[in-house]
Image (cartoon, rainbow, N blue to C red):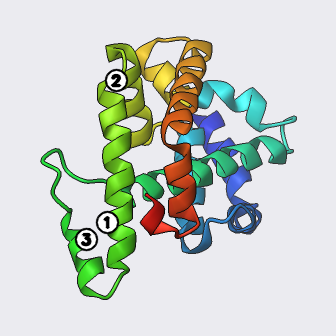
Amino acid sequence: MEETRQVLEKLSREHQLWINMALGCGAGDEAEDIVQDMYLLVWKQKKRFKDIMYNDSEVNKYFIYLIIYYAVADNARKKKYKKHMYNHRGNVPMEDINAIAEGSNIEEEQAFEKVYTRVYNLVDTMYWYDRKMFKIYFEKGLSMRKIAEETGISLKSVFDTITKIKNYVKEEIGEDWQDFNNEEYDKI
């Protein structure tokens, strides 16, 4: 308990540095939240103090940077997929209805819906294991490492499966996705 308090005290002395790291990674307004998440993760991962500290007084800033970097990346991925997720009935969530009402591009929304539908139709044809992995990774927004930890599946197996899924989806709908990103909605 005392060691935990000491490590967190040492980390908190560099709080502004951690905020600046999060900002440098693209956290924007969420930098403070990301850093708070880092403190929580450090607290939960007590057994990894040897990775966090070089010695009794010096914090391993690179290790902390990696925690912050991956937290920012996970946060961005979660926001990206939540922004466009539809509920299981295929209805548009309330926040998307509000965005449309506020003047968002209806053509873009329709094009996204087409691409989204193609992806999920494609996912429905996958082997059950791949389909389940897709849903855990893309819908829940869990990192590959977190999936491996929570399921007991090796990280390599999770990585290989997600990579296979990504490549399959890119192969099947890559052109439509590229048209969507290029705002060529009429080609979809």
Kindly identify the amino acid type of the residue bearing the numbered disc 1. Gln
As displayed, is residue 48 above or below residue 41?
above
Residue linked to disc 3: 95
Q: Decide which of 32, 113 is in the foreground and name it.
A: 113
Question: Crowding near pointer 1: few (<14 within 10 Å), some, many (20+)?
Answer: few
As displayed, is residue 84 above or below residue 121?
below
Q: CA distance from mark 1 to mark 2?
A: 26 Å
Kindly identify the amino acid type of the residue bearing the numbered disc 3. Glu
Q: Give the secondary structure at mark 1.
A: helix
As displayed, is residue 122 above or below residue 79?
above
Does 101 sit left or right of 153 as displayed?
left
Q: Residue at x 74, y 68 (%)?
A: 20
Q: Position of residue 159 (x, y in %)?
A: 59, 22
Q: Position of residue 73 (x, y in %)?
A: 60, 51
The number of discs equals 3
Q: CA distance from mark 2 to mark 3?
A: 26 Å
Q: Mark 3 and mark 1 in contact (Cβ < 8 Å)?
A: no
Q: Residue at x 56, y 23 (%)?
A: 164
Residue linked to disc 2: 132
Res 118 quadrant in image: top left
Residue 110 numbered mark, or none: 1
Q: Position of residue 123 (x, y in %)?
A: 35, 30
Q: CA distance from mark 1 to mark 3?
A: 16 Å
